[in-house]
Image (tube, grey):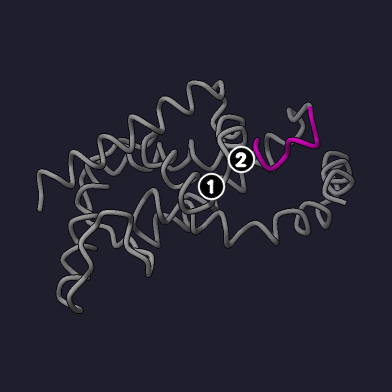
Amino acid sequence: MTVELVRRALDGDVDAFEELVAGRIESMVRVAMAILGNEADARDATQDALATIWRELPSLRQPERFAAWADRILVNRCRLTLKRRGRRMLREIALSSEDPPGAPAASGPEDVALRRHALAAAFEELDAEARALLVLHHLAELPLVEIAARLGIPVGTAKSRLHAARQRLARALERDP
């Protein structure tokens, strides 16, 4: 179904394009929000990405790879937004209801708020690529093969960069208890 919609959109069918992206918009905003930490910036980056996807659609050689191609454009828009922003912003990152293995249990709402703040501050120290890798893997729950395709890098590179991003995040968390 998706491949057929992509083919129709490639032929200039605006309705097919709208149907193709309608189901993806909210997940695109969530990914952009996790990378950028600001809803307005996330929505702007998503809108810019959608305009670029429509404009560049004729360059898509493999319709079955539409999702990976579109996500790569979104991540690149987020990178540009971070570069243009030129300032650091605090973001709120929702922690899961379960604590990671070995983490001390939260003792109350204040402890949870402090942990969220520490995680947000540590995440802010990461570059756009590290943020994208962590978001795509842990929030979007994509396998490494898909992450690599969406970022346009080899799987081994995605794996090593994800590992490095986790290490940088852990070091940043250790510095800000």
Amino acid found under the numbered disc labelled 2: Thr
Mark 1 secondary-structure assignment: helix
Q: Residue at x 68, y 43 (%)?
A: 67
Q: Where does label 2 land, which residue?
A: 52
Q: Residue at x 18, y 42 (%)?
A: 172
Q: Give the answer, above or below, for where 21 lies relative to 62.
A: below
Q: Is residue 64 magenta?
A: yes
- The residue under label 1 is which amino acid type? Asp
Comparing 128 with 173, the one in front is: 173
Q: Where does label 1 land, which residue?
A: 48
Contact? badges 1 and 2 (CB < 8 Å): yes
Rendered image quadrant of residue 26:
bottom right
Judged by its main secondary structure, the magenta piece is helix
Foreground of the two, 145 or 22 = 145
Side of 4 where 140 appears, left or right: left
First to last magenta residue range? 62-69
Mark 2, secondary structure of its residue:
helix
Q: Residue at x 88, y 51 (%)?
A: 1
Q: Badge 1, how many Cα within 10 Å: few under 14, some, many 20+?
A: some
Residue 46 lies, in percent from the top left, at 53, 52
- The percent position of residue 101, horizontal first and vertical second, equals 32, 54
How far across and down, in percent of the image, does residue 71 sit? Answer: 59, 42
Image-based side of 77 in relation to 82, left or right: right
